[in-house]
Amino acid sequence: MTIARGQTAPAGPVPALVEQFKGGLAAPICLTWEWTYACNLSCTHCLSSSGRRDPGELTTEQMRSVIDELAAMQVFYVNVGGGEPTVRPDFWELLDYAVASGVGVKFSTNGLRLDAERARRLAATDYVDVQVSLDGASADVNDAVRGDGSYAMALRAMENLAEAGFANFKISVVMTRHNVPQLDDFAALADRFGAQLRITRLRPSGRGADVWPELHPTDAQQREIYSWLTDHGDQVLTGDSFFHLNALGGSPLPGLNLCGAGRVVCLIDPVGDVYACPFAIHDVFRAGTVRAPGGFARVWRSAPLFAELRTETSGGACLSCSEYSACQGGCMAAKFFTGLPLDGPDPECVKGHGVSALAAIGGAPPRMGTDHSHRGREVPLGMPSLRVPAKVRVPAKLCDSSPLAGTA
Amino acid sequence: MITPFEPGRGYRLNPAVALRPEPFGALAYHFGNRRLSFLKAPELVELVRGLGSHRCASDALAAVPDGRRDAYLRALASLAAADMIVPQQVEGEVA
């Protein structure tokens, strides 16, 4: 999706668009919908703590009725994720159903199911976009976070997409301390496959909370990301995730520069719960469920949590800062999962206010309420060249076994 | 191929574009190029919806209050540049 930068507004007393967005829209623009918690990988920074399927995940029938509802609300496309969404046996069927209903799909994948034949079929389908996750431009950096073999799997998928003529698919990178030096390499990789690079911020959500202290970019690297984006911003997507860096300079990064949670963004999780944003899977940010009477539309339009998020925030401790209008206080989820108050500074505040606030915290920060991590899998620390021997896993419950048993 | 906007020409909403009503006006989504535009006033939404029933864009703009006509003209030009509105086919013209 591209937000046209053209001027379509009349002059006159019309408030800036971003001010209007703060009051919320009739339907989300960026709706993330996670189709399963099941995943073949165990990425150390997984923001949804995915791994095992949840027995309560929406059935095919329920998924179809949510798609019907999104179509009726004119939600023109959804960002589908997981887990690894393609492990759902009904994934391709639901994809076709959504597209036929006028709801476009951009799905995130680690590349697992994208063989040559599937890539050809996707290339022939209008209204579908594919986003391959890759967190290192080399196997050692990537696999330290995403697991052994995941780099090769992603590269194979990209080769298949490129060979099938799927132009402009996305390569999606979460920026870490180890891959910031590879920014140019990622751009070269995208060029090589005729793809577009997308870089996003590492959030301390889900299992990300465990590795965030070691993996989040240093202050110097934050400046590097900012200046790199200033130079390359028009060719690189960011999901609007670096607006906290706007306090670094005079030229704001392209995007809305606004926390969109509950205003233009929300998340539907695999069991049908609706959260304010994809990085905030916690009861505090749970607005309702698509299973309740009135479905998703009612949650979007009348959930008290969303009403609250659509009012002007106080700015709290940040109000006295000269840069508040540039950074807007940063990311709600990043604050919450590091234990910082929501009206205080972002943990990665470029003025250093986050660091001092973090030092003053007593007690452990809140944890994500649900955890679908594979049990018994060693989680490495995200450091390159750390090799952890595979262990024999015995499922504790039937649904613990990999949905890919025998196929992976 | 997008041709430059000419107010003397007839335009209509691109059939590949859907308008979603919003508190501020409408959100325009182009199913072909996946671009999103914002129509920032309900009046502009009406203008765009009714564009196809006028001989030319200038005629459609005649109903707009004087003080806003230039702004709406610019808005139509940028919508044309984004392929959100397209020229009406003139009889005998090859598409």
Image (cartoon, helix red, strand yellow):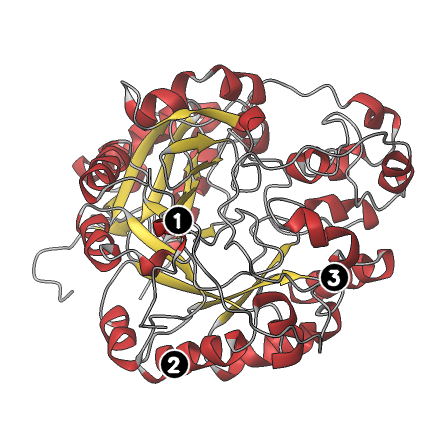
**Compared with residue A205, is residue A144 higher up or lower down, i.e. above or below?**
below
Residue type highlighted by circle 2: Ala
Position of residue B52 in the picture relative to residue A253 (left or right):
left
Give the mark toward the camera: 2 or 1.
1
Residue under pointer 2: A162
Find residue A300 and name its label. none
Find residue A225 and name its label. 3
Residue nearer the viewer, A383 or A400: A400
Residue under pointer 1: A397
Q: Chain of mark 1?
A: A
Residue type highlighted by circle 3: Ile
Spatial separation of the CA atoms under disc 2 and disc 1? 40 Å
Q: Residue at x 64, y 19 (%)?
A: A312
Query: What kind of element bears circle 1?
Result: loop
**Compared with residue A201, is residue A112 higher up or lower down, i.e. above or below?**
below
Residue nearer the viewer, A29 or A392: A392
Disc 3 to disc 2: CB gap under 8 Å: no
Residue type highlighted by circle 1: Lys
Residue A342 appears at what percent x and percent y? 72, 27
Quadrant of res A166: bottom left
Residue A265 appears at what percent x and percent y? 49, 37
Spatial separation of the CA atoms under disc 3 and disc 1? 43 Å
- On the same chain, marks 3 and 1? The answer is yes
Does the rendering let one see residue B33? no
